[in-house]
Image (cartoon, coloured by chain):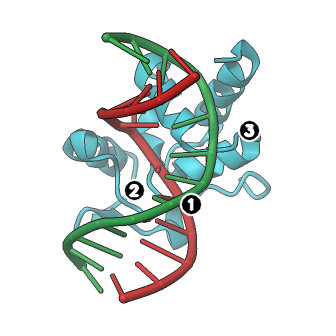
Chain colours: A cyan, B red, C green
Amino acid sequence: MDEQTHERVRDLVAAVPPGRVATYGDIAAIAGLATPRIVGRILREDGFDLPWHRIIRANGVPAPHLLTEQLERLRAEGVLAVDFRIDLKRYRWDPNRE
DNA sequence: CCCATGACGCGTA
DNA sequence: ATACGCGCCATGG
């Protein structure tokens, strides 16, 4: 991976404020990546010190293996899940609105 | 070089 | 809502 984009993604993830969420696609789009897969990959290998729990799938559901942990962390900061699903309409982070 | 494997996403059925 | 298929692309074998 390009060290540039790697940092870029890290910064973007870190920029998502508490109580808000973003999708892998959102981050990828802003970072100018061709595919959201890269975002997941970066978080996997280097996302332990980031608010990774604020990154979810486009359908509002967290990655399967993190489901419990992630929803718990989100709940702790006010993001509530209904039937394991986050309401993107309400919690999605809008960079231009904060 | 070819192939499989993902913290993904979208269109179809 | 569920299930596939396909595109995407970095990595590792």
Residue A20 seen by the camera: no
Q: Quadrant of residue A48?
A: top left
Which of the two residues, A25 or C9, is positioned nearer the viewer here? C9
Considering the numbered disc 1 on the image, is that residue within a helix, a strand or a loop? loop
- A40 is higher (above) or lower (below) than A29: above
Left/right of residue A24 with respect to residue A34 in the rendered view: left
At x 47%, y 35%, the residue is A40
Return the residue at label 3.
A31
Which of the two residues, A58 or A22, is positioned nearer the viewer here? A58
- Camera-side mark, 3 or 1: 3
Return the residue at label 2.
A79
- A31 is higher (above) or lower (below) than A75: above
Considering the numbered disc 3 on the image, is that residue within a helix, a strand or a loop? helix
At x 34%, y 61%, the residue is A80
Amino acid found under the numbered disc labelled 3:
Ala
Label 2 lies in what chain? A
**Which of marks 1 and 2 precedes in the sequence?**
2
**Which of marks 3 and 2 precedes in the sequence?**
3
Which of the two residues, A50 or A34, is positioned nearer the viewer here? A34
At x 33%, y 46%, the residue is A63
| Residue A57: x %, y % from top left | 44, 54
Amino acid found under the numbered disc labelled 1:
Arg
| Residue A29: x %, y % from top left | 71, 49
Q: Quadrant of residue A78?
A: bottom left
Left/right of residue A72 with respect to residue A94 in the rendered view: left
At x 34%, y 50%, the residue is A62
Disc 2/disc 3 C-alpha distance (Å): 24 Å
Return the residue at label 1.
A92
| Residue A37: x %, y % from top left | 52, 40
